[in-house]
Amino acid sequence: MAESNSESYLYKLEAILADERQMTVIVVSSSDEKAFVYAENNLLRHTVAPPGIQSLGIVEKKPLVRDGVGYTVETLQFD
């Protein structure tokens, strides 16, 4: 039986969708592989129709070992 890794990480992923929109997804996961699955699931829940993901990549990964770990995500301003 394989030894399980119980340490969790906070992942920031960026997606480019088929309609050229960019989205940032933040998930908690115990592995890179699961982080991609969780991010895709979040994108599906966030959109009305399946978003057609062109690319999805990990931008940052931080261990959840202390309080205050997080990310700052810049958002668009509308005129």
Image (spheres, rainbow, N blue to C red):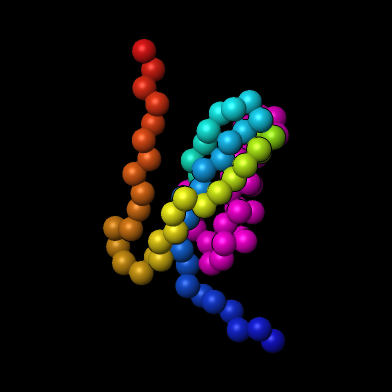
Q: Residue 28 in the image: x percent, y percent?
A: 49, 58
Residue 77 x/y as whole percent: 36, 22
Nearest the viewer among 65 and 16 is 16
Q: Residue at x 59, y 45 (%)?
A: 56
Of 20 and 30, the residue lying toward us: 20
For this view, does 35 lie left or right of residue 75? right
Residue 79 lies, with reference to residue 10, above or below; the image says: above
- Residue at the spot 51% in from the left edge and 75% down from the top edge: 6
Q: Which residues are magenta?
A: 26-50
Which residue is more in the foreground, 22 or 9?
22
Q: Residue at x 66, y 38 (%)?
A: 53
Q: Is residue 16 left or right of residue 62?
A: right
Is residue 39 magenta-colored? yes
Q: What residue is at 39 percent from the left and 31 percent from the top?
A: 75
Q: Quadrant of the N terminus?
A: bottom right
Q: Nearer the viewer, residue 61 or 25?
A: 61
Left or right for 49, reference 25: right
Work out which quarter of the rendered image holds the C terminus and state it: top left
Rendering coords of residue 33 (x, y %): 62, 61
Residue 18 higher or lower than 64, as above or below: above
